[in-house]
Image (cartoon, rainbow, N blue to C red):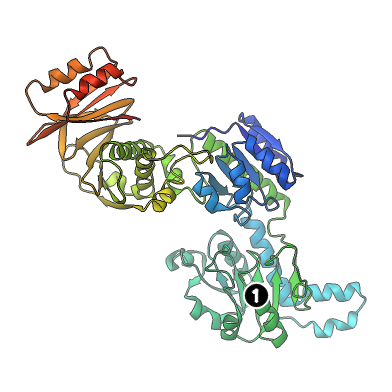
Amino acid sequence: MSINLTSVLISDEVDQKCVNFLQENGIKVVKNTKLSKEELLKEIANHDGLIVRSATKVTAEVIAAGKKLKIIGRAGTGVDNIDCNEATKRGIIVMNTPGGNTLSAAELTCTLICCVSRNVHSGDRAMKEKKWSERKALMGSELYGKTLGIVGLGRIGKEVALRMQSFGMKTIGFDPIIPGEVSEQFGVKWMQLEELWPLVDYITVHTPLIPQTRNLINDAVFGKCKKGVKVINVARGGIIEEAAILRALESGQCGGAGLDVFTSEPPADFTLAQHPKVVATPHLGASTSEAQERVAVEIAEQFVDLNKGKQLFGAINANAMTNALSEESRAWVTLGQRLGQLAGSVGGQSTGTIKVTACGSSLKEAKSYLGAAVLAGYLATRQQPSGDGITLNLVNAPVMAKEQNLQVEFSQTDDCSGQYSATVTVKISDGFQASGTTCSGGAVLLSLQGQGFPAPASLSGTAVVFSAKGSPQLMASISGAVAGESVTSLTLSSGGAGDRWGVATFLAPPSLKNMESLKGVTTTMSAVTF
């Protein structure tokens, strides 16, 4: 499973190694960092991929203009300048390079902590203005023994903690994802935010800017902290409310701030940046030659790996696709899609709930991709062709399903009865039920509507799925009806009361004449091309 990338547009300045690596791997590259909005809308239509940094605003309009777009990559952390919702809706993968800027951002954070603690910025300004006497007003404080509160304990937060511990700082922190037993491994005591605020002498934030983190540190938080607390932000402007910082600086509740990022960049109002207790830098967190080379190479490697179907790393909206590229799960993704197609073709169109059950210990992680795979197959049978460039895939299938009032209920059990160590069962609300497994990398059907097949039915090529009244002559009648066609397999269920189910697979769609012959034998019939 791979994505065919033939041409990539690079619209922001990135290291030349990015261009070289893509070209060495057979991908055409157009690099133009001076495109106007109108020029970008025209140029993007020619490319499968887009690489940006911060300057290019990848809006819904830009994404819609990229009729061939399959992937958008940001050479850096965060994707604030990309409309991820629109990209997801259109099945376009959005990725970044989460580790490329880590060391540079962590080092700048530590630098700002040191500068704020010793008034380095004010001392530098005094010297440039030949004001040696001001040194008396620039009394600082040691970092040794002080408490640093780290909000966000991912890659950057961890590296900041390790470095500031060497100064003798106590490190405490909070992260909604990183648990305490993990943060303890790098010397950070985990605690809730309400517990953290009264203890800290310094606060540094390392989170994305999302609704839950916007203005996370505000007047109320400053009020809970020690008088003179100092704050650092090398993450995203708006995590610490700028008006609240200014009020706290003026009142003395905040003793200093190191700010590399701002709500609007460049700031519409420089009052905060010019405050004497603020060390301000113009978004330099990733501005080192090492970081820029690293993120450029990383994003190129990620594009090439995806193009070769090896792996998908750094994707922020394609969890199912990420897992679908692993060797262990590819066949199960295919099975899920084909069971979904079968459900939509044989079971009919319904709204409500699709129940997916994975049986077998090898499918413990299947929740991350099986539901999306089944939805992609199911929705493919009901999607009308559109002229808006939207292609159904694992990225946007869950979004489209939600819009159509469809949801997936997933369950998994280790114990799998029968001769197969792992199976997948799909049920929909109108009574459809099918179970399948993988065999030699292919998808096979084990049962349909509760009836098992003595020999699994192949889910490949074109399959004609039918029900027919059971009789000793049924197999002969079906075989005669499809005689002369490129039949690869023909399977009938074990039977039971009522009709029996069968699957005939063909290398190519059967002729109209033989389809009519089958209608004379069967009760119901559906053709599915996988």
The percent position of residue 402, horizontal first and vertical second, equals 40, 53
Query: For the residue labelled by badge 1, is the local secondary structure a helix, a strand or a loop?
Result: strand
Can residue 352 be seen here? yes
Q: How many marks?
A: 1
The image quarter containing residue 454 is: top left
Give the residue displayed 62% in from the left and 31% down from the top: 27
Residue with the most extreme right position: 130
Three-letter amino acid code at disc 1? Val
The percent position of residue 171, horizontal first and vertical second, equals 55, 73
The percent position of residue 488, horizontal first and vertical second, equals 27, 19
Residue picked out by circle 1 = 231
Label 1 packing within 10 angstroms: few (<14), some (14-19), many (20+): many
Viewer-proximal residue among 77 and 515:
515
- Does residue 155 lie above or below 529 as drawn? below
Viewer-proximal residue among 386 and 76:
386
Horizontal side of residue 255 vs 323, given as left or right: right
The image quarter containing residue 232 is: bottom right
- Does residue 350 lie above or below 122 as drawn? above
The percent position of residue 89, horizontal first and vertical second, equals 50, 48
